[in-house]
Amino acid sequence: MNTSTVLVTGATGTVGSALIPALRARGVTVRAMTRDSGRSVTGVETVIADLRDPASLTAALEGADAAFLNSPSAPDAAALQIRFADLARDAGVNRLVLLSQYAARADSPVRFLRWHAEVEAHVQGLGLDHTVLRPNLYLQALLALAGTIAQGYFAAPIGAAAVSAIDTRDIADAAAAVLTTAGHTGRTYTLTGPRAVTHAQIAAALSAATGRNIIFHDVPADQFSAALTGHLPPWQLEGLVEDYAHYARGEAAEVHPSVTDLTGQPARDVADFARDHAAFFTATNTN
């Protein structure tokens, strides 16, 4: 498929910032969308647009052949994504790649999975060439815990349940493949790491990479919630607790081969992530 211009929403986020070089390596023109006029993306066209401003989205979509729709961190994320998808169709975008979440379904007890399922269902009814990517827990989420990890520990209400967590660089590489090659219309790909790992195994990988003793503490959900109260808005914190209950029930342990199928490369292991990000988990880099 010859996709000449790809609009990337959330271009300065974890997935978007990795997707842009992955797309450039495939020889396509990238249009990076960001809300912040002070955060242009080096080497590509940057457009200032906001998912809450339809006029800015219409301008950003003009002339784009494909679009990558990231999930915003907002209580009305589903409505914002649905409106973007409608505008993409109206703008004549040829292909839409939607970033969803592992195990998205309408009857899930996890609000984020219900929201993603709602967007997926809407996009499927638009008559637009689309593909859905459902990644599991991001390994890069550990970067938000770098402060405590540098002190030798991190905690979550997950017990010994294993999760096939994924490196966001693999999400980006898979998205780049889907955006630039044929054969993905109407497909849904679940994206995982190469194995399911417990948080104790993650702690061991971080210990090996940093040369420090890092311990994982299983904590009750209410203690986890109390520690984060004031750091996250209530809707996000409540959803995060639901996410972890989903993980703790063993519902996110399946391993899927989609990363390798799409990119031709094995998915990065937690040991790879820990080695590549070891500097983030030392005390000198958490100020």
Image (cartoon, helix red, strand yellow):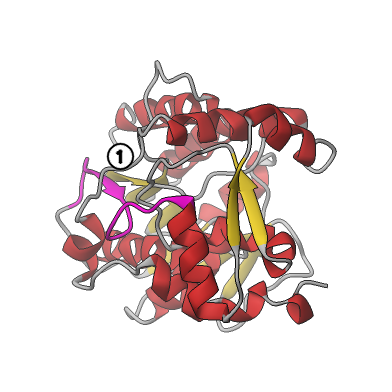
Magenta-colored span: 184-199
Nearer to me, 53 or 82: 82
Give the left or right position of residue 36, taking residue 239 as reference. Answer: right
Q: Position of residue 281 (x, y in %)?
A: 65, 73
Residue 188 visible in the shown view: yes
Tell me if mark 1 has few (under 14), some (14-19) or many (20+) residues whose alpha carbon lies within 10 angstroms of its own.
Answer: some
Judged left or right of residue 189, residue 152 is: right
Instruction: State the SS at label 1.
Output: loop
Q: Is residue 137 left or right of residue 83?
A: left
Q: In the rendered view of the protein, which quadrant contains the N terminus?
A: bottom left
Main secondary structure along the magenta-highlighted residues: loop
| Residue placed most toward the observer, 61 or 281 | 281
Residue 264, position in %: x, y?
A: 18, 71
Residue 236: image x %, image y %?
68, 34
Q: Is residue 4 above or below residue 190?
A: below
The number of numbered discs placed on residues in the rendered structure image is 1
Query: Is residue 58 left or right of 284 when viewed as pictured?
Result: left
Camera-nearest residue between 251 and 84: 251
Query: Is 145 inside the magenta-drawn segment?
Result: no
Compared to 140, does 92 lie above or below? above
Q: Quadrant of residue 270?
A: bottom left
**Magenta span includes 189:** yes
Which residue is pictured at 19% across the width and 56% down the height?
257
Residue 92 rendering spot, x and y as whole percentages: 39, 47
Residue type marked 1: Leu
- Residue at screen point 74% across, 66% down: 151
- For label 1, the residue is 128
Q: Nearer the viewer, residue 282 or 167?
A: 282
**Quarter assignment of residue 123:** top left
